[in-house]
Every structure is written in structure tokens, then in C-alpha cells.
Amino acid sequence: MAGDRRLRVAVGLFVLLAAASLVGPWLRPFDAWHTDWAQLQIAPGLAHGHWLGSDAIGRDVFVRTLLAGRVSLLLGFGAGLVALLFGLAYGALAGTLGGGAERAMMRALDVVSALPFLLIVVLLLTLFGRSAVLLVLAVGAYACIDLARMLRAEAARLRVLPFVQAARALGAGPWWLLTRHIGPNQLGFAFVYLSLAVPQAILVESFLSFLGLGLDEPSVSLGGLLAEGVQELEDAPWVLLAPATFLALLLIAFTLLGDALRARLAVRSA
């Protein structure tokens, strides 16, 4: 019952944030780039229409926060799906092969994880320009490392189970075992850990955007708004507090969702 309640709270909070980021901006008379020169750095309130205030050039913080949340969610889910595809393929293959091939693939993963990720991303963005596709691929590649390790461990556990051993005894090769037995039985486990990969991707992307390595205007993510809010912290703290609160609630929703799904998976595996 407690696990079901936690799952309902997590799903409810996530749906609320996602719906607000998708629909909320359309319900307001402002757009994210409209500058109201008569209301610069207006504090939050209802009378003037800027519910969460305005920034240094009069842009509505409420609308910009929701639109930035939408961008962060799209980038996070995109990077999470990239991490899921590559992590599942790499981890499941390593766990299925076993032996020296598994050890070599894990050592290669250790080498990749030791590389300076931020420096590599900076070089890529400098060479190819800042784009959503490049950010999704870069962040997804970073997030898939931990996912591949976990899925390799799960594949190694499945590899020694009786139904896999029986298939191997009947002459099934690695590809058959991977696509018909180990891979399909990892999907539930993989989607549970997708709830961890998505917030990790959102956090990494927000960090990159905070450093100025995110998307260019007019697109802006929560990290970009945090960077703007820090510059106005002394005169207009609400410019920072609004996106920071949205990001915190988003990460809390994914954390609760991941905990609830892992609890359900543990109960079913018991």
C-alpha cells in the first residue's frame, strides 16, 4: 500500500509538472520573449499579471520557467532514451557473452568513464556548434555508462538461470540468447532505471546550460534560467527561485517514481 501511494504521488507530481510546462504558457497573455519595459524586475503578484514576477528586461518569469521546463524535459527524455538504447545493447551483450569478452567490454567502459566528460562536450560544442541533437547525444552517452554497468550485472544474473542454460544446451547461440531470452527479460529492469537516467540527464544538461554550454536563445532550459537568475539574485531573487523550485520538484518526482518502481520490481522478483 505504501509503495502504491508513493507511486501515485510520484506520477501525480510528474503529470502536474509536465502538463504545466506543456499547457501553462498558452494560458498566459505573455510569451517568453516579450519585454515589458514598464515592469522591470516586478516582484511576484496577481494584480500586475506577472504571477512569478519579471526579470531585468521585463520578461514573465512564470512563462519562461514553464517553457524552460518543457525544453529540459524533452532533452532529458531524449538523452534518457539514448542512454537506454545504448546501455541496454552494450550491457546485455556483455552480460550474455561472459568470460573474456565481458571483462574487455567492462574495462573499455571504465576507460570511457574516466575521460573528462565536460572537456569533451566543450570541444564538441565548439567544433560543431550548440544544438539540441548534440546535447542529447552527449548527455545520453554520459548517462548510459552507469546504465550499461547495471544492465550487464542483470544480464549476468539471467545468464545462469535454468531457462537460459536449457536454451544454451539445445544449441542456442549468443545472439539467440540475447534477443529471445536475456534482452526481453531485462526490459522491465531497464525501464525502471530509465527513471534514474532521465533526471540524471536533466541535471547534467542543466549544469552545462548553467555554464553557458546549452542551447542558444530563443530556446532556453532550466539551467539557462538558473544562470540568468544568479546574475539578478541581489535585486530580483524570484528570477532564480522559480526555475530552481521547478527543477527541484522535477527531480523529486523522478526520485519518488524510481523508488516506487524499484520497490515493485523487488516484490515481483522475490
Image (spheres, rainbow, N blue to C red):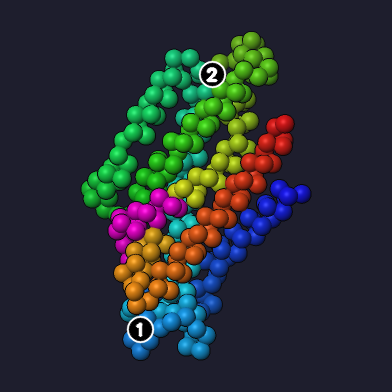
Q: Residue at x 54, y 60 (%)?
A: 249
| Rendered location of residue 253, percent (x, y) | 58, 55
Vertical arrangement, residue 32 with respect to residue 194, above or below: below
The stretch drawn in magenta includes residue 201? no
Residue identifier under label 1: 40
Query: Residue 174, labelled with which disc?
Result: 2
Is residue 179 at all visible to an observer of this figure?
no
Vertical arrangement, residue 103 with respect to residue 14, above or below: above
- Residues rendered magenta in the picture: 202-218
For the residue pair 236 and 123, the one nearer the viewer reads as 236
The secondary structure type at the circle numbered 2 is: helix
| Rendered location of residue 87, percent (x, y) | 48, 35
Earlier in the chain: of badge 1 and badge 2, it is: 1
User: How far separated are the C-alphas under marks 1 and 2?
Assistant: 64 Å
Q: Is residue 156 left or right of residue 136?
A: right
Q: Residue at x 63, y 37 (%)?
A: 188
The stretch drawn in magenta includes residue 205? yes
| Rendered location of residue 2, percent (x, y) | 73, 50
Amino acid type for the residue under numbered disc 2: Pro
Residue furthest left in the image: 127
For the residue pair 136 and 265, the one nearer the viewer reads as 265
Amino acid type for the residue under numbered disc 1: Leu
* Residue 212 found in image quarter: bottom left
Q: Quadrant of the C terminus?
A: top right
Vertical arrangement, residue 231 with respect to residue 213, above or below: below
Q: Is residue 220 left or right of residue 268?
A: left
